[in-house]
Amino acid sequence: MLDVRLYMLQRLTALVMAPLVIGHIAVMIYAVQGGLTVDEILARTQGSVAWFLFYGSFVVAVSIHGAIGLRVISFEWFGLKGSALQLFSWAVFALLFGLGAKAVYAVTFAGVGL
Amino acid sequence: MANETQTMTQSMTVSIWRENGDDGRFEKYEVPARENQTVLDVVAYVQQHIDPTLSYRFACRVGMCGSCAMMVNGSPRWTCRTHVSKVVADDQLEVAPLRNLPVIKDLATDMDPFFEKWVAAEAVFHPSKTRHDPMAAITPDDPMRIAASEAIECINCAVCYAACDVVESNPDYFGPAALNRSWSLVNDIRDDGQDVRLAAVGSNGGCHNCHSQQGCVQYCPNELNPTLSIAGLKRETTKALFRRSR
């Protein structure tokens, strides 16, 4: 069910996520100093390629990492296998990626004339 | 004889799993509570003195052959070397067939799936030389020899296989014993099948399904560490993956 490629993909995406999570938490602590407003967040992120890459790579890594993790759980605990398992794994990936990409786009380039 | 009569006066209850093509159930038997007896002694007593139809498997009785493993009070044990006094709880003893394997009858399990997975995990020797070649020179302090030695004393009893929760939830998983044997062969310089072995242990049923819970380590009667062997396989398959993609 979990071969060497999926196993490595999950470890590598964890490797990507680890510094991004720390960066995310650091920015949260920094950003809430003196209150948190939509304007302040958007001022930081809108039109920023750096923040787009930061959260964009996080979303990609989370989608892959989470899909593989839930794939293992659904197989071991709920007996999902074969094409149902494939479909479920891809659906989890698509859902996480879709929601994440939408959010990243919303805070970086939505409303910004490209 | 007097001694025998004296020890017979004290008895204990043993629950033994009985199954013969049906759903199976525990049945209780009164057996002598001897000061010094193994779980296998108790099972043998029931078969020899109470119910000759009881089926179970054993051979050497000294912990070498790996035939007599059963679930004892819920844990997998080699019954010939498990003293009743060490595992009895409230004078109760419960003996059942090994977990994670199909039951043939009573306490005898079908070991075929267990050994089929040894073959699937390429836990078989691929010779690189013929009998006409000189013997390979391997020094005792060779690191690969040391790694192989740490994994080599497996008696194929399937205690680890019964202890493994991943085997329970994933019928495709090769299990600790097969992967442990594969690891000892990865460290065998005489072996010529490393590519097919690493491909096998990196496949769907392979080492990457292990959650490192270490039930195998906990219960292995020979105190082997299959989890460590599996970690070695994870490392080698990863290296092979990057070698292939270069």
Image (tube, helix red, strand yellow):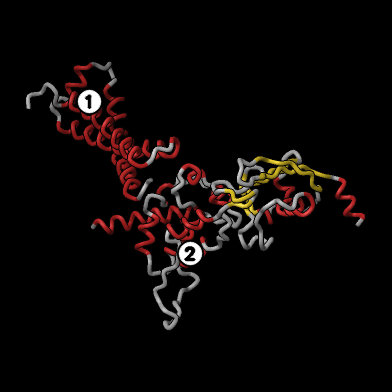
Q: In the depicted view, which residue is nearer to us: B173 or A37?
A: B173
Note whether residue B10 is visible. Answer: yes
Q: Secondary structure at mark 1?
A: helix
Place of residue B133 in the rendered image (x, y in percent of width and height, measured from the top left): 42, 82
Q: Amino acid at mark 1?
A: Ala
Residue A18 image point, x, y percent: 32, 38
**What is the quadrant of residue B194 in the picture?**
bottom left
Taking depth in this image into account, of B185 and B196 the one nearest to the observer is B196
- Compared across the picture, whether B11 is left or right of B55 comes to right
Q: In the image shown, does A28 or B56 lie closer to the viewer?
A: B56
Q: Residue at x 71, y 51 (%)?
A: B53
- The furthest residue to the right: B2
Instruction: State yes or no: discs 1 and 2 in contact (Cβ < 8 Å).
Output: no
Q: Amino acid at mark 2?
A: Ala
Which chain is home to disc 1?
Answer: A
| Residue B182 lies in quadrant | bottom left
The residue drawn where x is 61% and y is 42% is: B22
Q: Residues within 10 Å of mark 2 (few under 14, many from 20)?
A: many
Label 2 secondary element: helix
Q: Position of residue A6 (x, y in %)?
A: 33, 46
Q: Which residue is mark 2?
A: B148
Q: Is residue B59 above or below residue A31?
A: below
Distance from Cα at disc 1 to Cα at disc 2: 52 Å
Which residue matches tag 1?
A103
Instruction: Looking at the picture, tell me which residue is in the foreground, B212 or A89.
Output: A89
Tell me the subunit letter for badge 2: B
Look at the image and tell me whether residue A18 can be seen: no
- The residue lying at 43 percent from left, 38 percent from top is A79
